[in-house]
Amino acid sequence: MPPARCSIHGTRMEAKLLIIEYGLYRPGGEDQRYWNAREKGFPFTDDPLLGGCIVSECKEAGAYVCRECCAEAQKWITANAPSLKPRTVLRPPYPKP
Ligand SMILES: [Zn+2]
């Protein structure tokens, strides 16, 4: 299998284990703006995955992560949503392979 590349940056992505966070996701405000910007500009960050309200044994899941996406996400947060805690925004679950 060839290495996955970021569809935005063309960089080679790294397979990483991401933390799964459980709890209710409440879109709105800066979380939602971050999510919208992320979807368009930097989709492959290493944000925790959203596991939903039902807590399972599963604490981590594999996903491809792009370094450029992570850097842009941090830049976006600094510039647009400074009240967001950097790099801790929840996102919908990564699709199962
Ligand atoms: Zn990228």
Image (cartoon, rainbow, N blue to C red):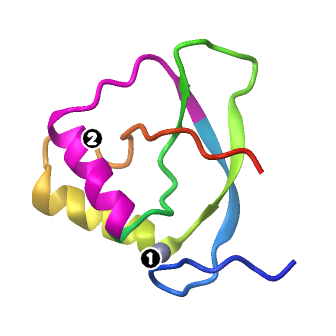
Percent position (x, y) of residue 21? Answer: 53, 28
Q: Is residue 48 above or below residue 56?
A: below
As measured in the structure, the alpha-carbon distance from the residue carrying label 1 to the one carrying label 2 is 19 Å
Residue 30 makes an appearance in the image: yes
What residue would you read off at disc 2?
85
Residue 60 located left or right of residue 32? right
Q: Which residue is mark 1?
A: 68
- Res. 58 image quadrant: top right
Quarter of the image with the N terminus is bottom right
Estimate the x, y position of residue 61 in percent, counting from the top left: 71, 42
Identity, as a three-letter code, of the amino acid under mark 1: Glu
Res 84 visible = no
Q: Is residue 1 left or right of residue 35?
A: right
Q: Residues within 10 Å of mark 2 (few under 14, many from 20)?
A: few
Magenta stretch holds residue 25: yes
Which stretch appears magenta?
A: 20-40
For residue 29, above or below residue 38: above
Q: In the drawing, does residue 20 fall left or right of residue 68?
A: right
**In the rendered image, the vertical position of residue 1 relative to residue 95, given as above or below:** below
Near-viewer residue (69 or 26): 26
Mark 2, ligand 1, within 8 Å: the answer is no
User: What residue appears at the point 69 percent right and 29 percent down from the top-left corner?
Assistant: 59
For label 1, the SS is: helix
Dot 2 amino acid type = Lys
- Mark 1 CB within 8 Å of ligand 1: yes
Residue furthest to the top in view is: 54
